[in-house]
Amino acid sequence: MRTQALLPALVLLVAPAAAGCAEASGAGGSKTVTVTVGYQSKTINTVTAGTLLRSLGYFEEELAARGEKDGVTYKVDWQDYATGAPITAQMTAGKIDIGSMGDFPLLINAARGRELKQPTRLVAVTGYNLRGGLNTVVTAPDSKLESLADLRGKKVSTSVGSAADGTLVRALRHAGIDPDKGIEKLNQQPSVGASALQAGSVDALSQFVAWPGQLAHEGRAKALYDGAELDLPTFHGVTVREKFARERAGVLEDFLRAQRKATDHLRTQPVAAAESVAEATGLPAEVVYLYNGANGIATFDPALRPRLIDALKQDVPLLKEAKLVADVDVDGFVDPGPLERATAGAPEYPEAAPARPELWLKGQQATQSFATPRELLRALRGADVRAAYVPDAVTGTPWFADKAVWVAEGTELRAFVTAAGAKSYVDRHRGSGARIVSFAEAGALAS
């Protein structure tokens, strides 16, 4: 494999002087404390610790209440980044106090913090998918590639050190392709990779939320591989500088309490939350809802679930193999204490339930759920549709109904994220007459 490192994932970016948690004296000798939060506005499974939390103002409200008690003026400096790498760089330089990023970058965050004597701790989760559906490999809409096996010898864009790269490596191995020699991997920022796919300079793109869904929604890509086929949890989480957590323990708990409130808001008002995030990021609300909606690909819950931590441990060997970390003490990195104190007495959220078909009509601030794909297809007739979502019949990953690959089997209609998934199902059920049909045909058969 020949790797073109256009934008190395671990470049340490130098930012303007903006000391984390800076203190200054104001009029009358009052003290001001600035808390610096690094987030990724377009990595929309971090919104409860970033974009949505910022728009709701919950953290500022918590800090205002604290300030009234201790006579300190607290301010929040929100810093937006495209990936987790620069957040880690700023955290290890002592310039960002709290950050949010995906599972692979979190491990790099832990390793870099230890190496540079600025240790960090994982204190909460934002969004997760228990099967790995947050990462997807996509190809051009008119591509002749039909499955991951067809990537042998092809150019594939991803962001080295990201969970999307981890999905690509694992998936290629499952397909019998050496990820180091079987493809030409280009290490690119998501936006660069998306442009490269559109220009035809790469054959496929492996990326994290929300890039695959956005490109599919806009007709600029189709799904080639659903990360949920790996059946390995992926998630995004919140990391904090250990020194900050020790010196400003109450402020950290305020942040986590505010994150819980933002999570409550997203879970109880998913359409409003999607609209808010869309307005702040410029992403289509339909794409935000695909991931963050009531039946979205992600489930939002701050809890550090054992299944997620176990998955994190399984990620370490891949990063070591790629020479991105020497080793990571995952148990030492994870610290559930601050979240437990911040949310003491709050009820636990239930684990993710299977997704259901869902319809979002134009002009509506609520969606409709259906028991079966057939019922969804019937509801689409004559409706003024904003978006329709349907879960993959095998992996459960929700996808846009008009972008899914449909299979008719007797009176049943099933949807799949990828053509390979649909073909695999048909091959296993030929005796029942299973066959791939178009979206229009599926709609006609739903009558």
Image (cartoon, helix red, strand yellow):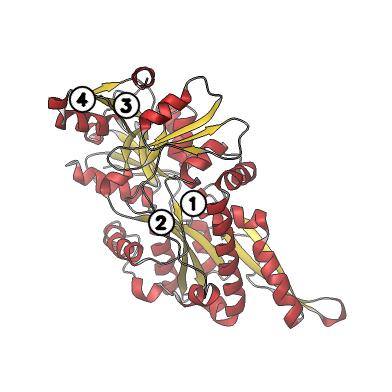
Visible residue check, residue 402: no
Circle 4: residue type: Ala
Crowding at label 3, few (<14), some or many (≥20) Cα neighbours within 10 Å? many
Circle 4 packing at 10 Å, graded few (<14), some (14-19), many (20+), is many
Label 2 with label 1: CB-CB less than 8 Å = yes
Residue at mark 1: 45
Q: Is residue 13 above or below residue 309?
A: above
**Distance between the Cα atoms at labels 2 and 1?**
8 Å
Q: CA distance from mark 1 to mark 3?
A: 27 Å
Kind of element beneath mark 1: helix
Q: Which is closer to the viewer, label 3 or label 2?
A: 3
Residue 406's disc is 3
Three-letter code for the amino acid on which mark 3 is drawn: Trp
Residue at screen point 66% across, 56% down: 56
Mark 1 vs mark 3: which is more N-terminal? 1
Q: Which residue is mark 2?
A: 235
Q: In the rendered view, tell whether residue 82 sits above or below residue 112.
A: above
Q: What residue type is disc 1 on?
A: Asn
Q: How far is disc 3 from disc 4 in space, using C-alphas?
A: 10 Å
Residue 225 in the image: above or below residue 63: above
